[in-house]
Image (cartoon, grey):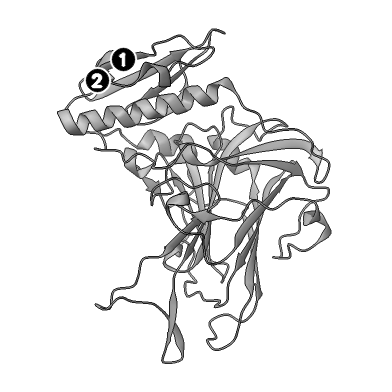
Amino acid sequence: MRHRLYTLAALAAAVALSAAGPGPIPEPKIPYAPPAYICARAAVPVVIDGEVDEPVWDKAPWTVPFVDIEGPLKPKPRLRTMAKMLWDDEYFYIAGYLEEPDLWATLIARDSIIFQDNDFEIFIDPDGDTHEYYELEMNALNTVWDLFLVKPYRDGGPAVHAWDIRGLKTAVKLSGTLNRPGDKDKAWFIEIALPWDILKEAADPKASPKPGDRWRVNFSRVEYRLDVKSGAYAKRADTQGKPLPEDNWVWSPTGLINIHYPEMWGFVQFSGSPAGQAREAVKKLPEDEARWALRRIYYRQWALKAEKGSFAPDWKSLGLKDKDYKLRGFAFPPDVRAAGCLFEAVYKGSDGTSWRIVQDGRVGKGE
């Protein structure tokens, strides 16, 4: 069935806020330390054929190897996974390497729930407000599931499945044989071109990035332990016959088993230089500290709502330590207000700008 195409503005307008709110918001159990990547320009347009060992990719660095989604709370992944990125005027290019001794995939219909297979996943929040972001999943059969998140599930969602990335290009290359137990496979490689014409719809302003811009991005890998039954792969089960939980390995850990924490995703900074010539450092902006402080206030407000039935009406009522929230370049204390099922917190900058978070988790420049 052909999916109807929607604009992001229409999707967002179609979703009503829940007055009751999402309930308690689990807080990440690791320090806030998202990785960063300088994304250089491609010297020539990338041919999407699954070949990542070719000149256009040679000088683009790999990310650090993926870690468990809970970060240092869990052991190092047993298989290696990495990604690299490039861009040009038309596309955001992504390559991936997934070490894999047992190549396996079953789903062939677009928009299947791909994480029921081993998969590779991409998450992109162009403006970093944690709302209106993209998700793309693919398996070793090059079957894709693309969807749009109006906001994270914790904040009421929803995910819009009836949405496709028009102009998406994907390819997979296998180093081994798919769905053939008994032999020794090595890896699978993915190559993707995401058109800016679609991605820019969730950006602010609605435009493709320019050199120096930063977007929030994360990558995830879902991996199941497999056994061989009747000559075919099957998910390993417990003593009750229930499949064991999958492993979740990511570029930027969230500190809990939930990838939909965009505030914990990595930074991708777009460079105007060709791959191999980018020399700039990743920007660190005063707003980064303000955004994270506001996020911690958001966690605290929802904890108080769950415990006491209401949000704190002012800064003092939050019960947070002043020293942890005094930020250079911003007035203290932040302006905290609440009424019924609503709250907001605002940091006012000495440069006249302000940053704001509200009860549904959206964070951005205040009015």
Residue 213 drawn above or below residue 173: above
Q: Secondary structure at mark 1?
A: helix
Q: Secondary structure at mark 2?
A: loop
Residue 367 visible in the shown view? no
Which quarter of the figure is the C terminus placed in? top left
Q: Hey, which quadrant is residue 90 in on the image?
A: top right
Q: Residue at horizontal 48%, vertical 31%?
A: 129
Residue kind at label 2, given as amino acid type: Ala
Residue kind at label 1, given as amino acid type: Trp
The answer to whether marks 2 and 1 mark residues whose Cβ atoms lie closer than 8 Å is: yes
Which quarter of the figure is the N terminus placed in? bottom left
Instruction: Give the labeled residue for mark 2.
Output: 312
Cα separation between marks 2 and 1: 7 Å
User: Could you say which is closer to the camera, residue 64 or residue 173?
Assistant: 64
Q: Hey, which residue is sitting farthest left in the picture? A: 309
Give the percent coordinates (x, y) of residue 96. 64, 59
Q: Is residue 112 left or right of residue 44?
A: left
Q: How many marks?
A: 2
Instruction: Give the labeled residue for mark 1.
Output: 315
Residue 174 drawn above or below residue 335: below
Give the percent coordinates (x, y) of residue 6. 47, 44
Q: Is residue 315 left or right of residue 11?
A: left
Give the percent coordinates (x, y) of residue 58. 80, 56
Crowd around label 2: few <14 · some 14–19 · many ≥20 (10 Å): many
Q: Residue at horizontal 62%, vertical 33%?
A: 214
Q: Hey, which quadrant is residue 326 in on the image?
A: top left
Q: Hey, which residue is sitting farthest bottom in the picture? A: 230
Crowd around label 1: few <14 · some 14–19 · many ≥20 (10 Å): some
